Image: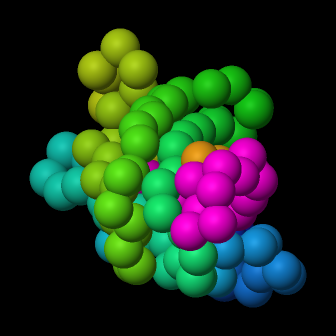
Amino acid sequence: MRKLLLLSITFIIISCVKDNNGIILNFYNFPNPFHPETENTKFRAILDLTGVSSFDWELKIYSEDSSTVYEASGSVGTPSSPFDILWAGRDNRGNIVKNGIYRSWLIIKVTKTTSGYSGDTYKADFYTVVK
C-alpha cells in the first residue's frame, strides 16, 4: 500500500510539468488530494492573456477507466489570471465521486483578441486524487 501511495504521489507531481500549452502557463488544483464529503477543490489556471479579450472554457473530468465524470463550461468576457474553477467532487448527476485518481482537462478557446476574433484552442491536463 505504501509503495502504491508513493507511486501515485510521484505520478501526480510529474504530471504538473507542462510543455508549451499556448496561453495556459500552468494548470493544477488544490487541495490535492481532497475529500469531497468535507471540502471542495479549486482548479487554477495561470494564463498569459496578452492580447486576449474573451474566451470560452470547459473543464472535463474523467475517471480511471476514462469515463466522463463531470463537465462544466462558461464564457469569460473580461479575463484575468489566475482563472479558478471550483469542483465539489460530484459527478454530473450530483453524486459524490468514488475515491481514486481523476484526469482533468481544461480547454480554453479564445473568442476575441485585441486585434479581432480568434478561435485558437488550448488544452492542459492534471491528475486529481479524491480520498
In the image, what residue occupies the spot 63% across and 36% down? 63
Q: Residue 72: percent from the left, percent from the top?
A: 44, 34
Residue 126 shows in the view: no
Q: Nearer the viewer, residue 110 or 31?
A: 110
Q: Residue 12: percent from the left, percent from the top?
A: 66, 74
Quarter of the picture containing the C terminus is: bottom left
In the image, what residue occupies the spot 59% across and 63% down? 113
- Classify residue 89 by image quadrant: top left
In the image, what residue occupies the spot 28% across and 20% down? 94
- Classify residue 5 by image quadrant: bottom right
- Classify residue 30 by image quadrant: bottom left
Locate residue 32 relative to residue 129 in the image: left or right.
left
Locate residue 1 relative to residue 93 in the image: left or right.
right
Q: Residue 88: percent from the left, percent from the top?
A: 27, 44
Quarter of the picture containing the N terminus is: bottom right
Q: Is residue 15 above or below residue 98?
A: below
In the image, what residue occupies the spot 35% across and 14% down? 93
Residue 91 shows in the view: yes
Q: Is residue 63 above or below residue 87?
A: above
Q: Is residue 94 above or below residue 50?
A: above
The span picked out in magenta is 112-131
Q: Residue 46: percent from the left, percent from the top?
A: 51, 80
